[in-house]
Amino acid sequence: MKKRGTGLGCTWYGTGYGNGFPDVSSAFVEIHDDGTAAVLTGAVDVGQGSSTVFAQIAAEELGLRPEDILVCSGDTDVTPDSGTTAATRQTYNTGNAVLKAVRQAKLRLQEFGARKFSCPSPEGIELKDGMIGVRGDPSRSMPLSELAWEARLLHGERFISASSFTAQTTAVNLENGQGAPYWPYAFGCQAAEVEVDTDTGTVRVLKIAAAHDLGRAVNLTQVEGQIAGGVAQGVGYALLEEVELAEGRIKNPAFARYLIPTALDVPEIESMIVEEPEDTGPYGAKGLGEPAMLPTIAAIINAIDAAVGVRITSLPATPEKILAALAEKQRGGSGG
Amino acid sequence: MVELELTVNGKACMLKIEPGERLIDVLRQRLGLTGTKEGCGEGECGACTVIMDGRTINSCVVLAIQAHGRDITTIEGVGNRIRPHPVQRAFVEEGAVQCGYCTPGMVLAAKALLDKNPDPSPQEIGAAMSGNLCRCTGYDKILRAVQRAAREVTGT
């Protein structure tokens, strides 16, 4: 018989290296004569889209289009170190470093613009749609490319900057448990609907609804991609994936014996984005990568319990474990 | 050495190979078509997918000599930046690419499906794409991209 159930899983997750480990990101920025800019950073984009996020941040500050920004990343010969693409930290940590560096170069640009346009303060200089000029006075503006070109060739002025950002973290005192190991924290909640076949013990995940607080979505497509990727990995963690060890060796180091989800195993996914701005993040953004997979597992295990009344207490919840638990339950045991 | 004749992306190729060479090695190393990726090397992940006479195959578990006289399409023969195939355009528009390693195989699997069945059901798309593993995307946007490409191909 096929039975359905729903379950809920919640997570909170400290992002960054944590526990006092130095967590530093750096970026170089140069605004070019042709009105484009380059961002150099050690942060490696492994597909999650950090380079796009950095281009968006620089473009937002400079009044340019993201395609006007060249992001050069992850080349140890030329880019400043920004730590690993891990710990859900690149949008927050390196995003902050890029934002600080861009603002530094932008301020020099604004100072030059203030002199050029006889504006009393650099804050009165606005960068918008590829133009630079006095805020609220379109008659006193010019293309950014012209101003940068003039600054370099007539005045020897360059708009180059370097900056770093260090995440807030202190080690936990092991005596009293005090300390502030992580900042910021990410929060998420997912609901799963599953169908359990009581004859075979197989579980089909029908739908996952995933709500995640990520501060601010810098790029919505990438946010959805991170959530879907996390959910799929969570489905694998809950139902399929197990590293089998024998005397320190992995017995199943192949996709034929270590199963990961295929296109047929992933459920319908409904993403809900909660934007509760994080004051210390770039435009309020914080990380999403790892938190996206954590609640999936608990939600699925709880949904199995709701469907057939057995508590699975070791992962993955294989058909064998579910059938054994159902048989145990029938015999009047406690299940699981 | 043995002689191998095959058509790759519409071009006739004639080359001398070792009898035991795999198709993926001939494509990548002898013909320089490095768009085809090797993942698991044992026919499980689909990263090395190419189309042979209209059917997708895992080029890591096919001997090159088995392609003698056959017609092979690799990702290089599907489209390019200036003229992308509808499947490639849909992948970009839906955001269906993350790390990109599975993408050439995914695009070829989708193309082979749509060539035979331009109006597939969601179940048929899932089944056709299930031989290609992806660890980043969760497949969601990939499946949407194939649906989008199907709509474009059929003009609906």
Image (spheres, coloured by chain):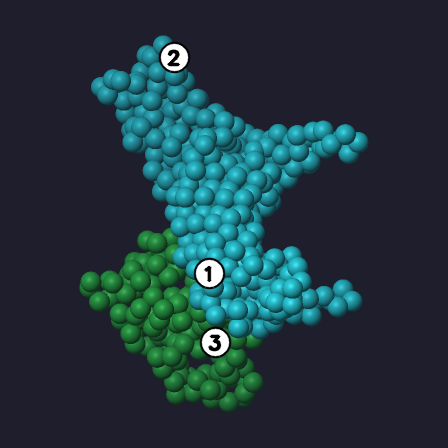
Q: Which residue does the numbered mark 3 point to in the structure image?
A: B58
Tell me the amino acid under the disc marked 2: Ser
Pointer 2 indicates a residue of which chain? A
Q: Earlier in the sequence, mark 2 or mark 1?
A: 1
Image coordinates for residue A131, horizontal then vertical, percent: 30, 28
**Residue A5 drawn above or below residue B63:** above
Residue farthest to the front, as pictured = A332
Q: Is residue A178 visible?
A: yes
Q: Which mark is residue A121?
A: 2
User: Which residue is at a point 48% across and 70% down the rendered structure image?
Assistant: A1
**Category of crowding for the residue at label 1, using alpha-carbon neighbours closer than 10 angstroms: few (below 14), some (14–19), many (at least 20):** some
Pointer 1 indicates a residue of which chain? A
User: Which residue is at a point 69% across and 36% down the rendered structure image?
Assistant: A19
Q: Are marks 2 and 1 in contact (CB under 8 Å)?
A: no
Q: Are marks 1 and 3 in contact (CB under 8 Å)?
A: no
Relative to A276, A80 lies left or right:
right
For chain B, the rendered hue is: green
Marks 1/3 same chain: no
Pointer 3 indicates a residue of which chain? B
**Category of crowding for the residue at label 3, using alpha-carbon neighbours closer than 10 angstroms: few (below 14), some (14–19), many (at least 20):** many
User: Which residue is at a point 31% across and 62% down the rendered structure image?
Assistant: B147
**Category of crowding for the residue at label 2, using alpha-carbon neighbours closer than 10 angstroms: few (below 14), some (14–19), many (at least 20):** few
Q: Which residue does the numbered mark 1 point to in the structure image?
A: A4
Report the chain shown in cyan. Answer: A
User: B3 or A196: which is nearer to us?
Assistant: A196
